[in-house]
Structure formats: C-alpha cells, structure tokens
Image (cartoon, rainbow, N blue to C red):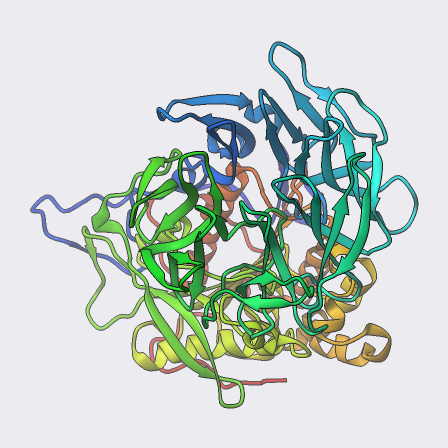
Amino acid sequence: MKLHGYLWVLGSLFCLGACERSNKETPHLSDNGERIVAPYGSWLSSLSANDVFEQADNVAELQSVDGAIYFSESDGDKQGQVGIKRLDKKGNIADVVPPSFNVKSAVHEYGGAAFLGIGQSLFATKAQDQLFYRFAPNQPPLPLTPNGTRHADCIAYPKGSRIICVREDHRQPGEPKASLVTINLNFAGEGDTFVSGHDFISSPAISPDNSQLAWITWEHPYMPWDSSILWLGDLDRKGQLHNIRKVNTPTDSSVTQPLFSPDGQLYVVSDISNWWNIYRVTAQNTLAPVLSKKAEFAVADWHLGNHNYAFESETTIIASYMLGSQAALIRLHLDSGLTESLAVDFGEITQVIRGEDAVYFVGAKATPEKGIYKVIGRGTELVYTPSLPKLDPNYISRAKNITFKTGVNQQAYGYFYGPVNPNYTAPHDTRPPLIVMLHGGPTARASLAYRSDIQFWTSRGFAVLDVNFRGSSGFGRAYRQSIYGKWGQADVEDAVNAARYLVDKGWVDGQKLAIRGVSAGGLTVMSSLAFYDVFQAGVSYAGISDFEQLAKSTHKFETGYLDQLIGPYANNQARYRELSPLYHLEGLNEPLLIFQGLRDQIVPPQQSRQIYEALKVRGVPTAYIAYQDEPHGGWKPEHRAAGLETELAFYGQVFNFIPAGKLATLVLDNAAALKPPVLKGHPRATRGY
C-alpha cells in the first residue's frame, strides 16, 4: 500500500519516507587486535536496538503486603506489558498477575499507583478497559468498578472491607470528575463518595488506627507541583468522614506524599522553602520542618504513587533526595535531627517503602545495576534485579556533569557522555557528532541513572548530552518555575547554548549537531531548528508544533499548564503563534525526522502530521513514521527499537557516514536537498526570536 510517495504497512507501523532494507556490509574487527580507524557514528556495537528495549524489564512500583514485597514490572519480551510479582522473605519470586493482563491506570492520562495488595488478594487496574479488578486465590479476576471510570492511588480501609481510591469519572460529557471513593472488596458496585468538589484529588493516606484520613487537592489552572492543598479528616466508627480541615500552607507552594508515622503523626513534603523538604503537621494545622536541606525529597507528580520516604521506626525515617546530579539515601533521626548517609552511588532512587523487616526501594545506578534494594544497617543490599541488556563495561560511557551559561545571567545543567568503544578509534583531528537529548514535561528531569539507549549511541561513536534545561525538576522550585512564561524560548535557548558550550570546548563536531526530544522535548527540537541555525538535524517523538491547537485540545490534567508556561490563551494568542514552530517554517530548513503514536491523547497526532506535510511541501528533507496503536508514552519495545534504528539511518544520511550493521533504509522526502558536509568552521549564525 502506498500513500504520499512512500507508505508501507508493517503490522501497526506506518512509515512515510521509510523503510527499505539495507544490505551494507558490517565492518569486521581488526585481525591484529588494533583498533579500527573509522568515522564517528559508524562503529559496530554489541548493543543492538532490540537489546535496549526488548531485552529490558523495568520495576516501577513497590508495596509491602503481609511480609512480602509486591511490585509491578514491565516485560520487554511481552511488548512492555506490566504484571505484578511477589518477593518473599527468602528471596523467592512468584507471578501474581501476568503481564498479559497489563496493569496500568490512565488517571490523569499518565497513571501510576495502579495496584493494591491486601492479605491474599490483589487489586489492579487493567489497561485495556480501566476497570479495577480483584485477584483472589482460585478465583477468576472480578471487576469491581463501573465502566467509564478510572481508579488509582488506592489504600486499604479495613472498616467495612473497603478500599479508598482516587476516581476519575468519564461517564458524562465534558471534563472527567475527580473524587475520592470507597469500593467494596467483595462485589462490583458504584461505591460511595468520600470527597468531591475539586478539580484534582490524589494521595490518600490513612492513620495506623484508621481514625484519620489525609489527601491532597489542586485546582485549575495549577499543576500539583505549583499550588496544592493538604486536607485532613476524622473517620468515625461507621467509616464516615467528619471534621474536614485544611492544613495551612502558602498558596504559592505545593505539598506531596502525605504519610502517617507509626504513632499516628502526619508528615508531608512541601516546597515552601523553595526545596521539597519533609515537614510534620502540627496540632495547629501548620507545617514544622523536619529537616531543612537544599535538596529535593520529592519529584514532580506526573504519575501517582511516588514515595521518597518511609518510616523505619517511630523515630527514624529513610528518605531519598536529589541534589543536582546526586541521588542519595539517608536515615533521619527525628529525636535528634541527625542524619546518616546510606548511599550516594545511585543515579536515581524511587519507591521508598516500609516492609515488614526493613525499608525497601527501587534504585538505578550509573552502571547497569538496577533493581529492588533493602536497607541494612548503614548500607543497602540488592535483593532483586529485572532482566537487563548486557554490555561489556569497556563499552560504557560515564557521564560528566556540566554547567553552562544561558539566558540572562542564568545557568543550566546537563550530563555529557563521550563516545566509547574499545574496538574503534576515529580518524585524526575529528570530533564526534552530538545528540542533544531533551526530556518531556517540560517539568521532568534527566538523571544519572544508567540508560541503555544513551549507550546505544555512545558505543557507535556519538557524543550525547542529556540536558536539564530551565524548568526541569530536581533543582528547587525557583529553577522549576524559571520556564514559566518562557516555554518554547528558555528551553530552546538552553539546548542551543548547551551545544555551543560543547563545540567551544572542542568536545564535539560543530557541523554534526543533532537534537532529539519527546513530547515537550519534541517542541524544543522543532523550535531550535526554526529559530536558530545551530543544529543540522532534529528528531521529534510526539512533539508539539502548534501551541494554539494544544491549548484547545489538551487533556484535563494539563488544561491549565499552558497558563503557567506561556500565559492564558485568551490574552496571549499572538504569543502562542509567536512561539509555535509551525508558524515559523521559513526558518526550519534542516532535516527533521518525526515519530508519532496515533492513539496519543496528550499530544494529538495532527501536531506531528501537519508539520511533516508543511516541510515536505517546502522541500525540506523529512520523514513521518506513525504507529497505529501507540499512545503518548509506553510504546511497545519493538517500535522503540525500530525508532532507534531509523534514527541511526537518519543521522548517517545527514552526517554522511555509513552506519554499521543492517538497518531499515530511511527514504527521506526531499532527500536531494540534503546539504553536503562542511569540513571546517563553527555552526551558522543565530537567527533567534
């Protein structure tokens, strides 16, 4: 089947301007043991695209249930579907819910906190229908919730054999309604509403004696990390909620992760000091600091169910924090305020929970080590590791932290990975091509946690820069909000200035600069190409090209986000067009490769398709690859692997080298317009805004 010049149907994959097979020969290693001299980007790597995704499993969420640890794990061999496993005290692993069930919630579209264990039963949301099911021994899965509703962030409530859940109700036209509901453990039904009347509700927490309930709310136009409120209510003997009161916090602050101590004292994380620190809720419903530290003891709540701290005992807390590039784990003594360092060698620490015998967490190091860890004394022990792709340590590139100037007397951050391959060296006096990577959000962040997809590039002779541009989390509230009013400008400036910094350092080839990003990062890609002459190639995954369309069509969770990032649309229509790359294509002349999932509910596929069609008409080298059944994130491993291979073929064409191995040949629209390589000099002049 052929459309618009080039279109093949490969299962659920559509390629516009792709995908013939290449028969180029694979380079062989030198017989005399010496390094092969070959251009950067053309090196043969033992890490394939399939290894990166199809051979990789990922542990996401932990829960302690009756002395065992239950955890969700995506299975790379099962197209990334998510199941639930059980880790007992002896280290034995058992499957509780198979990956074929695919445990995923779509509350707020991004989901999280999709399962709950109680005794011998487990409760989980199924991705396909979003119903909440009970799994009991020797019984088939039983759906407990009505069609058209979504549930997550559930906790056990022993009175009346019920569960308390966050509900998102999609049964009526208009915005879905948020509420906190109770669900019966034993039979299907509507359930009872505990809390309603707010745009968003999350993070229910119940006291050990079941007498108090805490939860968090926030309203349009804010995100949970902008302005959110902690509530507290009393539960009577009949299970009814009374005496609801608000904990007093400034309106320009956020709260997250409420948690009761073993003796019934409520704690929470707040950024009232600019940093997400841990606080105790006083009898006067105010916050008292537990530890004041210029570090982040929380993350931006794009997903439900984040846990950065847990009570080891009534007087000690185990907590994880981020400080710049450092992820650390500490023990905090509440009676003295003293802290002990438990681990500083992780790139990322998540899901800190209290088990029956110890505190557990999910950790990822800068090396391939990753899994579930247990706190033992003043150290940690790895107790479970998922299936991970194997890579010889001699191929692994280690990150260098960089800080560079940007904006007006400001700075931004990144992790630089140089090319590493023990079998190759580049021709004399050449520099590697650079791939600038941009996270989504834009209020997400890059970390030092080992990533096979970065090593895929560095082991082939690319340099990679993973950027924490202004707006990234992990550096305090002020840095997180420094992109507000400047999205599409500040992040773009940072990407451009990061590349210039590396060129000026002599670390990369200034004529082989590529930029790639996902979602919000895809916007930065297209804007960097449209407004600056620095990058020679761009790759966008589900990127945003038109802010106006996004303002009119985005989902509920992010409805007001643009009000913060740019300004209310009604008063800033000209600004929305000014910042949208779709309306500035006269400046976008560099090759652009575009990927898009056609079931995307967050960034409508039209955002990608329209810029592809416009560039094709203008004669710009481009290709559009769409995946029929893919949503915004969580693509199947086979599609993610195909994306990496297609990117490699794309860079080979643009930067004029032959990639090693057999790849699907990318047939670019307007390939004849590819510019010949420039041998000397720096990037072209800046156009700017």
Asked whether residue 104 appears in the rendered view, the answer is yes
Asked whether residue 646 appears in the rendered view, the answer is no
Left or right of 232 on screen, residue 591: left
- Residue 114 vs residue 277, the one in the foreground: 277
Q: Is residue 383 above or below residue 415?
A: above
Extreme residue toward the bottom, this view: 409
At x 63%, y 48%, the residue is 304
- Residue 297 vs residue 675, the one in the foreground: 297
Quarter residue 293 falls in: bottom left
Quarter residue 323 falls in: bottom left
- Residue 494 vs residue 403, the one in the foreground: 403
At x 66%, y 71%, the residue is 253
Q: Quadrant of the C terminus?
A: bottom right
Extreme residue toward the top, this view: 138
Q: Quadrant of the N terminus?
A: top right
At x 7%, y 46%, the residue is 32
Q: Position of residue 175 (x, y in %)?
A: 86, 51
Left or right of 4 on screen, residue 260: left
Q: Is residue 524 above or below residue 425?
A: below
Quarter residue 562 falls in: bottom right
Extreme residue toward the left, this view: 32
Q: Position of residue 278 (x, y in %)?
A: 53, 62
- Residue 494 vs residue 13, the one in the foreground: 494
Q: Position of residue 614 (x, y in %)?
A: 71, 64
The number of callouts visible is 0
Q: Position of residue 523 (x, y in %)?
A: 62, 66
At x 81%, y 79%, the residue is 572
